[in-house]
Amino acid sequence: MLSNPPLPFGRRAACAPSPFRHRGRLLLLAGLLCSLPLTGTAHGAFRLIGLTIEDAAAREVVERYTLARQLQPVRFHGTLRTTEWLLDRPPLATTLARHLHPPLERYHVTDRGASAYTVDDEGALRGEFRLVARGLDRRVYFVEGQFRSLAQLLKLSGNMVFTLEYRELKIQSDSYVEVTPQLFLRLNNVAAHAILKVLAPLLHGIIDRRVANLAEAAQVVGQRVSKDPSALYREMRTWPDVRPEEAEAFRLAFSAGDATP
């Protein structure tokens, strides 16, 4: 193994960099390099999870990704009908998750119309996403935004395509939905591709933590909607961030109690 040349007498303690300082400089360099933009756009329709997608930005991500992950399936109480209903209403689904699963209490999703939404967790994550394709028991979304990590030291911007495939399972007398997610991430800079070996462990860790939080929230929400929608409906009517028409739509969809106060 090669070693560093000896330092002059009397300067070794002052000059030898600590591993922490070296790691901090490396991450700072990565953050600065991530400001260099990538160029180029893919065109034409393409197929993903059996769906034909006509979205140039989504195709560019899938064909020129920085990182791709096939994630482990997530299973929770529910039915396909419940799942589709909540997926059709991302702001309300996020509100339910925010109230029922405290780790997501900072997440907010706002409807921009035309199946497009903004997402903000009041800190590290900010961006927009839209539904680009849907079919029987499957959907594809395109996301663009920014993410900050390591006490705001590292700022990443880029685009992502994530897919959801889901199916209903019967286990004894209970209904479950199993969702299999897949994602393609493309960072918007040249340097990120060059230093992927440095960034990959960080990115995988971020993805795993976010997916774990979302999976836990899905399990909690699925349990409450499936097992006791009436009690959940009564709670929803006390939440200031749920509009009366949203609560009423939930009541009608799940026969969740009386409409009167």
Image (cartoon, helix red, strand yellow):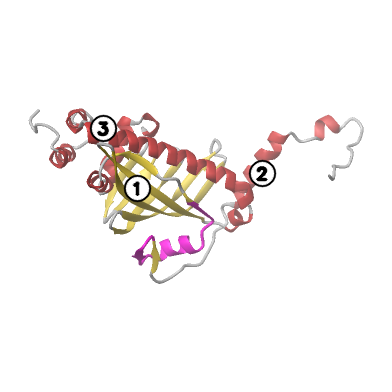
Dot 2 lies on which element? helix
| Mark 3 in CB contact with mark 2 (< 8 angstroms) | no
- In the picture, the disc for residue 45 is none
Rendering quarter of residue 227: top left
Dot 1 lies on which element? strand
Q: Is residue 205 left or right of residue 132?
A: right
Please, which residue is most extreme toward the right here? Answer: 9
Q: Residue 215: image x %, image y %?
A: 39, 39
N-term-proximal mark, 2 vs 1:
2
Q: Which quadrant: the C terminus?
A: top left
Mark pair 3, 2: CA separation: 45 Å
Rendering quarter of residue 47: bottom left
N-term-proximal mark, 3 vs 2:
2
Mark pair 2, 1: CA separation: 32 Å
* Front position in the image: 84 or 116: 84
Query: Can I make out residue 30 in this image?
Result: yes
Q: Is residue 186 left or right of residue 191?
A: left
**Looking at the picture, which amino acid does disc 1 mark?**
Thr
Q: Which residue is mark 2?
A: 26
Q: Which residue is mark 3?
A: 224
Q: Residue 195: image x %, image y %?
A: 63, 52
| Mark 1 in CB contact with mark 3 (< 8 angstroms) | no
* Front position in the image: 57 or 167: 167
Q: Residue 252: image x %, image y %?
A: 12, 40
Q: Which residue is mark 1?
A: 118
Q: Give neighbour class at mark 3: few <14, some 14-19, many 20+ (Cα, 10 Å).
A: some
Query: Can I make out residue 96 in this image?
Result: no
Q: Which residues are magenta?
A: 49-69
Query: Which is in the foreground here, disc 3 or disc 2?
Result: 3
Residue 48 part of the magenta segment: no
N-term-proximal mark, 1 vs 3:
1
